[in-house]
Image: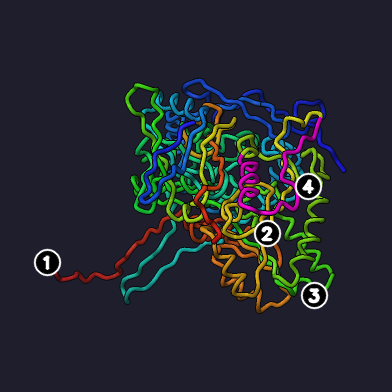
Amino acid sequence: MIESTVVISGETLPRVALTSESVDLLRKLWDQHGPLMFHQSGGCCDGSSPMCFAAGEFWTSDNDILLGVFDIAQRGSEARNIDFWMSKEQFTYWSHTFLTVDVVKGRGSGFSLEGPEGLRFLIRSRLMETAEPFA
Amino acid sequence: MTVYAAPGTPDAKVSFKPRYEHWIGGEWVAPVKGQYFEDISPVNGKPFAEVARGTAEDIDAALDAAHKAAPAWGKTSTTERAAVLNRIADVIDANLELLAVAETWDNGKPIREPLNADLPLAADHFRYFAAVIRAQEGKFAEMDGSMTAYHYKEPLGVVGQIIPWNFPILMAVWKLAPALAAGNAIVLKPAEQTPVSILVLIELIGDILPPGVVNIVNGFGAEAGKPLASSPRIRKIAFTGETTTGRLILQYASANIIPATLELGGKSPNLFFADVADQDDAFYDKAQEGFVLFAFNQGEVCTSPSRALIQKPIYDSFLGAAVERTRAAVQGNPLDTDTQVGAQSSNDQLEKILSYVDIGKQEGAKLLLGGERVDLGGDLTGGYYVQPTIFEGDNKMRIFQEEIFGPVVSVTSFDDYDDGISIANDTLYGLGAGVWSRNGNVAYRAGRDIQAGRVWINNYHAYPAGAAFGGYKSSGMGRENNVLALDHYQQTKNLLVSYSEDKLGFF
């Protein structure tokens, strides 16, 4: 399990994590495709799933928020940083939850890089300790 | 009751080929890199056919074929094109059971749905666009006594289409019919979860179309979808799916300066006003069914009525009856015509639905029904079945805000009209909505006040060709299922003609 760095101003707790299966898959994808990024999707079909792209493939904007950065490098190796992004409007409805990127069998239907591996990244969620979502 | 024989058994209505290639230039073409992937039936979780795993090279070959075919196809008369569309519709009608079994085996949906909805709608959709293209007329305007501006609708040329997995044939037809009617050649990529049923259809209709007018390249989004969507050789891209990929498609379209149409789903509210329960009659029964329609197609519908908003005076009684009505839904073998709830389309979809049941519970929503995976036993034990699930909670919860795309409805109450509309519109999306009331004035006002592209008044989940379908807000852009869709596949040619011998006099 790898937790993200804290990148949102004023916050002290990480918001996103990777399971060890996700880390293994991301290391494999990094070897194939180079640096990577995540953008959390919404909407139908494959929505609500995290999309993994080559870093920079997906254009983020001021209307996206960076939730955290993962370093998936092996100990002692050069850093392999992966940003995890979400649209700001989606974050207004997700901010009270901590997200863990897991892996299940499947193939998704977007352009996420892991589909051909027969695997799909999946978000598991729990409430943030500090959250007051429905106040 | 009829139980259709499973594909692979002696009496099956459809026999799949062991391997499907790409359909390019009117024939089956092996993938350039020689790779294939397995298509898994969600009915039993087992692979049943291999499908070509396309790459940029295959997309290029398909684009070559499409560009070769487009000029002539674009110049055929609308009479000829309409005749082609009508013949396709006739073939769908004539092969109803075969296609229905294929669709159910590929997607997991209960077979009564493709028999009575997906396929009849698909056939009618072709006929609708055959009709509207015949009826379409250009416009002209007289600029002055000797100059006239003529406006012709011309095809775009070659277009790309990326299809979702929830209605593999019908969603392909929603995009194919207007594009063909308008005179375009097409490169289409089916969803990687459900590639085969559309290939069974193209096998039946392939010889009706001139070679290269419709080309189908299979494969994964990252390997085949991206090269199609980002190609400078398409003049338009159409996509149904989710928001991140939708944005990526727009990004590629902006690089090539081409139009894109996107249908990105929603979180559709279904409002039940108190007067619905004024009488216990046929209308009340219809409204109850309207609630349970969240389980239609296992909830894998972009417009699934996945938020039920019930006015307070009838909340307990209406919801209580609706829970019992849902409990009575028959889940079972998707090939049985009595089955009402079939299988989710894929393992990752099943896992995602269960992850939402989990967060719903953590957020404090009350589970009123379901919430578990179902093991139907026997041959179906490996299939992807989830119980119809009802949660009671608050509209700020994530289960009220995200399209779970499963048989899960999130229910809450509202006080008065303004409160109901406010909750209905408290969402990022605006694709569908339902309004139920015996008061026509209330229903009308609610229909106009809800920010969604399709509001069903006193019905739900009807998709007749002719009724425009598309999203407000983050649900996308463009309209399908209506003559408006032709606009997305045509461009306007203006001939500005002078009928005068007089020069301008500037030079």
Name the amino acid type tagged 3: Asp
**Which quadrant: the C terminus of chain A?**
bottom right
**Foreground: B108 or B308?**
B308
Structural crowding at the residue carrying mark 3, measured as other residues with C-alpha within 10 Å and reported as few (<14), some (14–19) or many (≥20)? few
Q: Is residue B421 above or below residue B55?
A: below
Q: Which mark is residue B340?
A: 4
| Same chain for the residues under marks 4 and 3 in the image | yes
Expressed as whole percent of the image width and height from the top left, the position of residue B49 reads 65, 26
Give whichever of discs 1 and 3 has the lower sequence position: 3
Q: Nearer the viewer, mark 1 or mark 2?
A: 2
- Tally the numbered discs: 4
Q: Which mark is residue B278?
A: 3
| Subunit under mark 3 | B
Q: Secondary structure at mark 4?
A: loop
Q: Are the residues flagged by discs 4 and 3 in contact, CB closer than 8 Å?
A: no
Q: Secondary structure at mark 2?
A: strand
Q: Secondary structure at mark 1?
A: loop
Expressed as whole percent of the image width and height from the top left, the position of residue B369 reads 75, 50
Name the amino acid type tagged 2: Val
Q: CA separation, marks 4 and 3?
A: 29 Å
Residue under label 1: B507
Residue under label 2: B411
Structural crowding at the residue carrying mark 1, measured as other residues with C-alpha within 10 Å and reported as few (<14), some (14–19) or many (≥20)? few
Expressed as whole percent of the image width and height from the top left, the position of residue B169 reads 63, 43
Structural crowding at the residue carrying mark 2, measured as other residues with C-alpha within 10 Å and reported as few (<14), some (14–19) or many (≥20)? many
Give whichever of discs 1 and 4 has the lower sequence position: 4
Q: In this orientation, does residue A70 appear?
A: yes
What are the residue bounds of the magenta stretch?
B352-377
Name the amino acid type tagged 1: Phe
